[in-house]
Image (cartoon, helix red, strand yellow):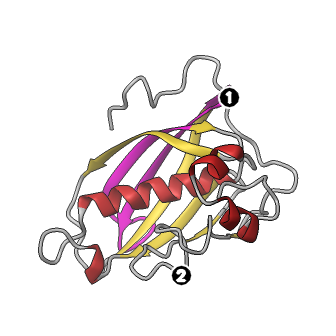
Amino acid sequence: MTRSTITTPPPGATLPEPLPGAPAPGAALGSHYSRCFGCGDRHPTGLHLSAVTPDGVSVTAEFVVGEAHQGAPGLAHGGVLAAAMDEVIGMSVWLFQRPYVTGRLETDYLAPVPVGTTLHLRAWCTGMSGRKAYLEAEGRIGAPDGPVAVRAAALFIEVGMEHFAKHGDAQTILDEHHDYEVNP
């Protein structure tokens, strides 16, 4: 995957390390919020990703492509696959215990993904510099070591929680996140 300079860490960027209080290796991660399209359990046609951190700095998840996720007949919609990449990357940023938003997402499609396929997702950070986090992800067909169907590179920007209160639903943030250290 050829990344743009926007999603490539600059010289001097550092790699994250597990933070005190972060989920332990092997721990399941909670959803951003219950109606999140990517990970919420209350979104009727969402991806319903459930993620785990194998090491405290990366994330793995699975996504079963359903009928509601197709573009061409019988195949996953490319936008839905991009959303899955954005979501698994967003879940990995959650491990940094600060709120981030997507600044740029580059997605490469390498193979069609049929409806009914389990896509095994993995995301990791390639560097951090100031408020910027540089991340990558991949989706593999059928197994964690299956053929790569989709890859992504992203730039995420750290923001304050007031960003979500100003531009979103402040009451839902209060209702579902009593601790403002997580990315809603």
Q: Quadrant of residue 156?
A: top right
Q: Is residue 135 magenta?
A: yes
Residue at 35% x, 55% y: name it.
Answer: 82
According to the image, label 1 marks what residue? 14
Bin the neighbour count of mark 2 within 10 Å (Cα to Cα): few under 14, some 14-19, many 20 and up.
Answer: few
Total marks shown come to 2
The residue lying toward the viewer, choosing from 179 and 169, is 169
Name the main secondary structure of what is drawn in magenta: strand
According to the image, label 2 marks what residue? 42
- Secondary structure, mark 2, is loop
State the image coordinates of residue 23 (x, y, percent, origin top left): 77, 62
Q: Is residue 58 left or right of residue 24?
A: left
**Which quadrant: the N terminus?**
top left
State the image coordinates of residue 38 (x, y, percent, origin top left): 48, 67
Q: Is residue 167 above or below residue 25?
A: above
Q: Earlier in the sequence, mark 1 or mark 2?
A: 1
Which residue is situated farthest in the right direction here? 20
Instruction: Give the magenta range.
Output: 128-156
Q: Is residue 21 above or below residue 103?
A: below
